[in-house]
Structure formats: C-alpha cells, structure tokens
Amino acid sequence: MNRIMQTAASGMAAQQLNVDNISNNLANVNTPGYKKSRIEFQDLLYQSVRPAGSETDQGTKTPTELQIGCGTRPVATSKMFSQGDIIETGNPLDVAINGDGFFQVLMPDGTTAYTRDGSFKLSDDGRLVTSDGYEVTPEITLPLDTTSVNISRDGRVTAFVAGVENPEEIGQIELVKFINPAGMKNLGHNLYQATPSSGEPSFGQPGTEGFGTIEQFYLESSNVDVVEEMVNMIVAQRAYEINSKAIKTADEMMQLVNRLK
Amino acid sequence: MVCLRKYQIKAEGAVIRDIQNLSKEMISRIIKQEVIANNLANINTAGFKKDRVFQKELDSAGNRIKEDVNEVTVFQQGALRDTGNPLDLAISGDGFFTIDIDGKQYYTRDGHFYIDSTGFLRLTNSGLVMGENGPIQINGEVEIDKNGRVAVKGEEIDRIKISTFTQPYPLKKHGNTLFEALDNAEELPADNYSVLQGYVEESNVNPVEEMVRMMTTLRYFEADQRVLKTHDELLDKAANQIGRV
C-alpha cells in the first residue's frame, strides 16, 4: 500500500508542477515577446508483479503479465513559439518580428543571447539596447542630432540627422533561427540561450526565406491565452485533488489492516 | 466425544482455509488499488492507456476463492486536444507511432514530438520517430496530412510509420508512454487511422470511473477485513472456549 501512496504522491507532485507552470504563464500574460511553456508528462517504469507464463494454483499458465505502474513524472517543459499578437505602440524603437526568428543580444560576459522582445532603447552613447541595457548585435549606433529613425521590413535602419537632407543608412538588423527553438534555455528577462538541443543558429536577413519581417512601431505581445490557461488550471487542480483521494483511500485501507488484530 | 472432536477439527480447518483465502483476496484488492492509483496519477499523461485488473473470485465449481488476478490495458481512444503546435501529432483510430531507441522498436500513442539538434523528429525525452524509410529529418516548415505523409516546404519527404497488431494487442508497457511488443508479436502496417497535426491524444483515464472503482474496492476490502476478523473470533472461540470443555 506504500506503493499506492508513492504513486499518488508522484501524481500530486506532477500536478503541482503543472500549476506552477500555468501560474508563470498567467503572470506573463502582459510580457512582450513572452512565449508560453507547457509541461509534458510520461508514466514511470512498470514493476512486474507476476510475469506472463507463471503457473496459477490450478496448474494452468497465466496468459498475461501483471505489471504495476509507479506513477507519473514530468519529462520536459517546452516553450511554444507560436506568434503572439502584434500590437501598435507608436514608439519608433519598438520592433516586432512577424514570423520566425530572434534578435541577437550581446551579454556582458561576451556570449550571445536571443530574444523576441523588441522594445529597444538607446544607451547614453546612442547604441540600440534592450530594456535591460544589453547591446543588440550587429551593433547599431544612432548619430548625434538624429531627428527620426526608420526601420524597414527587411531590417535596414536609416536615420534622419538634423541639417542633412538625405537619410543616412546606419545598420542592418539580423535575425537568427534555430532548428529546435523549444530546446533553448530560458535565461529570464525575455532572453534565451542556445543549447546543444536547440542546434546551431542560422543567420538571415528579415523577410528572406523562413525569417519573419520586422515591423516598426509595433510590439509582439505574449502568446499566453488566458482562457486556455484557466482551463488547464482547473484540470490540474482536479487531477491534484483526485490523487489526494487515492492517498486517503490507501490510508483507510492501512487502517483496516491495522485493525485486524 | 470422538465424533465431536472430529467435527471440531474439521471446522477449524475450514476457518483457517477461509482466513488464508480472505488474505489472498485482500492482497489482490491492494493490487487493484495500486493499478487505479497509477491510472489516476497519469490522468494528464498524453497517450496514456489505462489498466484494468480482473479478479476471478470463484473457480468453476463455484466454491473457492482464487487469488488469480489478471491485468489488461484498455486501448480505448483518448480525447484529442488542440494544441496548435505543428509538431504535436495524434492518431485517431487504430495504430501506434513507431519509436526507435538504439535499434529497438517501441510503440506509442504519445504525440509530443520535437526536432532535435540534428533535425530528426523525436519523442520527448525518448527515441526517434520512424517513417516508412527510417528516421524523419525535417528542416523547415512541416505539414503532415491525415495519412501521415510528411511534407517539408511543400515537398513530400516520407510517411510516418503507423504500426498495429492483431487484437488483442500483444504489447506490454515499458514506461515513458512506450509499449514494447511481446516476443512472438507480428507488426503490421495500420490502415484504419488518421493522423492529426496540432493535436495530442490525452490520457484515456476517466476520473469518475476510477473514483467509483476506488471506492468499491475500498469497501470490498473493508468487508473482507470484517469477515476475516469474524473468522478469527470463531477460531478464538473454538480454540479457547470449546477446546476447554
């Protein structure tokens, strides 16, 4: 009966983790560029109580094996990289990717991180940075006295400088793609890191084959669907409850055994 | 006097045998409860198939309790859930996805697939998903039709291998939502199915059914315990009161 308790406890732990994940999704319902994650479960190993072909007390052989499962376990959290809604903000440094791809960000330790959050800002020396101050690569620096910035759908950045008639081309936004984006590591701050399971990044210009286009004055909102998360939460809560009932039942059975003598 | 003693021995023998049978029955009820607990723990596991335990309580003569318990896996279709993820696949109908782990084939109804760093389609935390021409390599936008044909950027590259067996399926559970074929099982190509992209087959565990089974099993267990206790009291009377005369 200890096994019932363990099995049900594994179910409760799994559902607990499920609710943790759902609440994180819900907490990020308004985070630009946030991608919802989900937990996947698999059943645990099976314990063979009686192998097939063992003899019964009537001298016949049992045709099937008696296997008892030991519960469930979470095996993976995977990010769902579906497109979030694109919302107009009117800010010239807000850019959204409409399609696949990530912006590249230079981390202070020299490594590269990736993001879908295009709410860029300017640093004190005119460089394009993320909200946390990390530099966007390839580097884009706005000249002094810039009056307005224009970012085209294929990622070309041009600036109008006071006193100069023609716009000046100052950089090009480059996007990267991964064969398995779900395998990337979450760094928080809307940033992801490449891992062996995500594969090597492939670089490309926005709007070219497989890469999304850049939309200036827009932000990609979180792709969390509140209704879906609420439904998942109800399901998880009920599953948690039902597993606790299994523990209670095992407890009651144990009590009955104890009362035998 | 002689006659009485004979009766007494006979009665005691029957009571002891009853106690043994009852304890066997209680053990098989515990096994039943363990299987129900495992079903409930996997109520949210994609592609999970519930198990059922059958007890035969009487033999053909109808007078003796057997301890024999039999287990079957119920391969009933689980509900299909729309996830919108292009790498989630579900089978509606008969058949299994074929998964290769180090050259050994396993079968599953769990369709949480992903593309690994070398571009091959894999089951989460597990092996390669097999197509009719071996592992499936995908590099780009993928579309899978209801016959399981995989098209990358509009070009057909392979067809997902859906295997089946003659019923009852000669499969046993391996854990990680995989099934393993028994030694003499013959794998057949399935033809009565459709593959749905962007869907996942949920666990086929029905919470109401499991709760009812759990409650009844508990109450039967309780009844067994009461009867066993009564037998024990009888034995106590036989040994300590009748025996004293």
Image: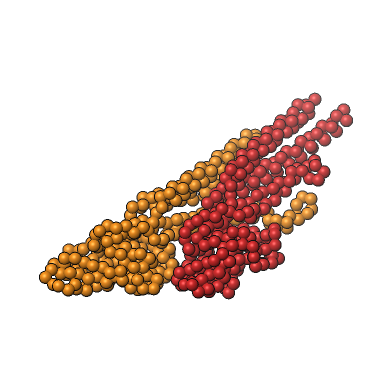
Chain colours: A orange, B red
Query: In which image quadrant can residue B103 be found?
Result: bottom right
Residue drawn at 68 percent across, 33 percent down: B226
Q: Where in the figure is residue A52, as x and y percent of width and height? A: 70, 57
Q: Can residue B99 be spotted in the picture?
A: no
Q: Can residue A226 be spotted in the picture?
A: yes
Q: Residue furthest right?
A: B2
The mark tally for this picture is 0
Query: Of residues B197 and A62, which is closer to you in this image?
Result: B197
In this picture, is A74 found above or below B224? Answer: below
Residue drawn at 80 percent across, 25 percent down: B245
The N terminus of chain B lies in which quarter of the figure?
Answer: top right
In this picture, is A22 found above or below A176? Answer: above
Q: Residue furthest top?
A: B245
Q: Where in the figure is residue B222, as x and y percent of width and height? A: 65, 36
Query: Of residues B230 and B48, which is closer to you in this image?
Result: B48
Residue drawn at 62 percent across, 36 percent down: A256
Query: Of residues A220 and B178, which is closer to you in this image?
Result: A220
Residue drawn at 29 percent across, 60 percent down: A218
In this picture, is A251 found above or below A47? Answer: above
Q: Where in the figure is residue B137, as x and y percent of width and height? A: 50, 72
Query: Of residues B28 and B11, which is closer to you in this image?
Result: B28
Relative side of A139 to A184, left or right:
left
Q: Residue furthest left?
A: A163
Q: Where in the figure is residue A86, as x and y percent of width and height? A: 34, 59
